[in-house]
Amino acid sequence: MTRIIKSSGDSEAFSRDKLLRSLRRAGASPNQAEAVWHAMAPEIRSGISSQHLQRRAIKHLRRLHRVLAARYQLKKAMMELGPSGYPFERLIGALFEARGYTVEVGQLMQGHCVQHEVDVLAHKNDQHVLVECKYRNTPGYKCDVKVPLYIYSRFEDIRRKKHWPPEQMQGWVVTNTRFSSDAIQYAECMGLQLLGWDYPERSLKYWLEHLHLYPLTVLTSLSKTQKNYLLAHNLVLCKDVLEHPELLWHLPGRTSNHLPPRILSECREILQA
């Protein structure tokens, strides 16, 4: 039995069906998914890492369709938003905006005891949502129980100062990685909302795909240096690139006038897929 090494360091049996499902979720047709599988099959051996398998799948998908490759590498693209957590906070703010909230990012709020920085503050009707973003740009990290323990106490300090009834305030912890079982158990007990890469059922991955909030780091027509250039200019999402096409003409390393239109075309295809 072929076993692969996950980002956590654990091993699991390789599943052809799991690979095909992941390709189909990215939008590949049954024939395209099978074509990628047949191209990858000779490379799969015991001890290979899941990250290496993903890179190979992206390479083969790119030969079939760049947009499929972009959507397939969403998790990897999230890791490329760093090292600063600010783009991730912007992305989470956009997620709440897309769900009808009024959003502020990076707010200082006075609590009953001390002042706190709140990554994302969202309001809708009489509901107040305080969000702590835990971003990591390396795989294998888990938010353990210390994170919700600490965050819950901060949010309660703010709620006490604001005199918000408990039913009018929600505290959230959002991460691009995973939560430990203890973190989930504590959050459920205390009424703290968790949103991780694959938790709960409507996870961060689900909402990003459902709302078409693709970070610009999914774009296969950009180099890493060019992605960092756009992030440094406060662009985070593919839709941000469409709204500020003028920056594409100043990309470092651009050698062709065909590149900006190609990037814009890829953005449109991703958002329309």
Image (cartoon, rainbow, N blue to C red):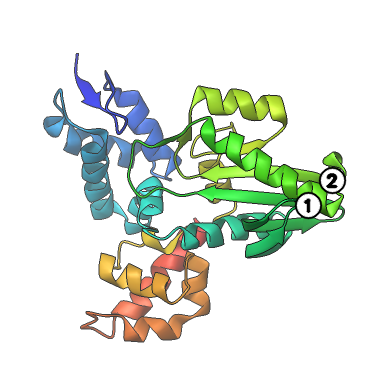
Query: Which residue matches tag 2?
Result: 168
* Quadrant of res 34: top left
* 87 sits to left or right of 72: right
Is residue 100 in view from this perspective? no
Viewer-proximal residue among 250 and 8: 8
Viewer-proximal residue among 238 and 194: 194
* Residue at the farthest front position: 113
Q: Residue at x 40, y 73 (%)?
A: 232
**Which mark, residue 109?**
none
Q: Residue 205: percent from the left, percent from the top?
A: 51, 43
Badge 1 crowding class, 10 Å Cα cut-off, few under 14, some 14 to 19, many 20 or more, is many
Q: Residue at x 64, y 50 (%)?
A: 131
User: 55 above or below 109?
Assistant: above
SS of the residue at dot 2?
helix
* Residue at the farthest top position: 1
From mark 1 to mark 2, how far is it between C-alphas? 6 Å
Q: Earlier in the sequence, mark 1 or mark 2?
A: 1
Query: Which residue matches tag 1?
Result: 128
Badge 2 crowding class, 10 Å Cα cut-off, few under 14, some 14 to 19, many 20 or more, is few
Viewer-proximal residue among 271 and 94: 94
SS of the residue at dot 1?
strand
Tag count: 2
Kindly indicate whether the residue at mark 2 contacts the one at mark 1 (C-beta within 8 angstroms).
Answer: yes
Q: Residue 174: percent from the left, percent from the top?
A: 56, 44
Viewer-proximal residue among 162 and 67: 162
Q: Residue at x 51, y 71 (%)?
A: 240
